[in-house]
Amino acid sequence: MATTALQGEVAAFFDAFVEAFQTFDGQRIARRYLAPYSALHAGGSVECFSTPPEIAAYFQKVVEGYHSQGCRSCRYGELEVVSMGQACVLGTVTWDLLLEDGRVLQSWRESYNLARTAEGLRVFATVDHAD
């Protein structure tokens, strides 16, 4: 079980992620990730990004797609935190993409493998939970 301090550290990471997301700027979002970065999608496909520019381009494409569907912000909930030693932590959240009026456009559950760096927690792998 995660300590209160660890829970707070991971919550602060996701709070900052929400702020970055709301800019719809792929490069700003990508600053929260380490290269290489691997994403396992709910359908079972895996994408790997070797460089920060590849990660930024990926997130720019993602947020442009969300924005075109009417998404204007996001929120997370149901935070679960598992310590994986001194260097890493697993954070799992449920994401809601929100329309301008606050209605939920889309929801999913995702786990983030986070590494401690000099700049704070950074994502090196994610897993979208399959239904």
Image (spheres, helix red, strand yellow):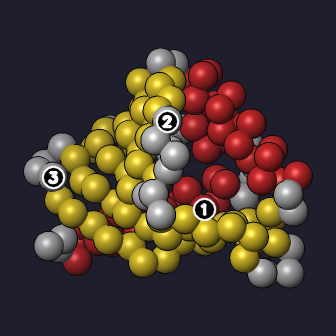
Q: Residue furthest left?
A: 85
**Label 2 crowd (10 A; few <14 / some 14-19 / many >=20):** few
**Left or right side of 66 for 75:** left
Distance between the alpha carbons at the discs numbered 1 and 2: 25 Å
Q: Secondary structure at mark 3?
A: loop
Question: 65 above or below 96?
Answer: above
- Quadrant in the picture for the N terminus: bottom left
Kind of element beneath mark 2: loop
Q: Amino acid at mark 2?
A: Ser
Residue plotted at (81% across, 44% down): 64
Q: Amino acid at mark 1?
A: Val
> What residue is disc 2 on?
45
Between discs 1 and 2, the one toward the N terminus: 1
Vertical order, 120 against 37 (above or below): below
Mark 3 residue type: Met
Quarter of the figure with residue 60: top right
Image spot of residue 61 (x, y percent): 74, 36
Tell me if I can see residue 72 in this picture: yes
Using residue 12 as the reference point, say whether residue 90 is left or right of it. left
Question: Badge 3 is on which residue?
Answer: 84
Horizontal arrangement in the rendering, residue 101 relative to residue 50 (left or right): right
Depth check, mark 1 against mark 2: the one in front is 2
Label placed on residue 18: 1
Q: Is the Cβ of the residue at disc 1 closer than 8 Å to that at disc 2?
A: no
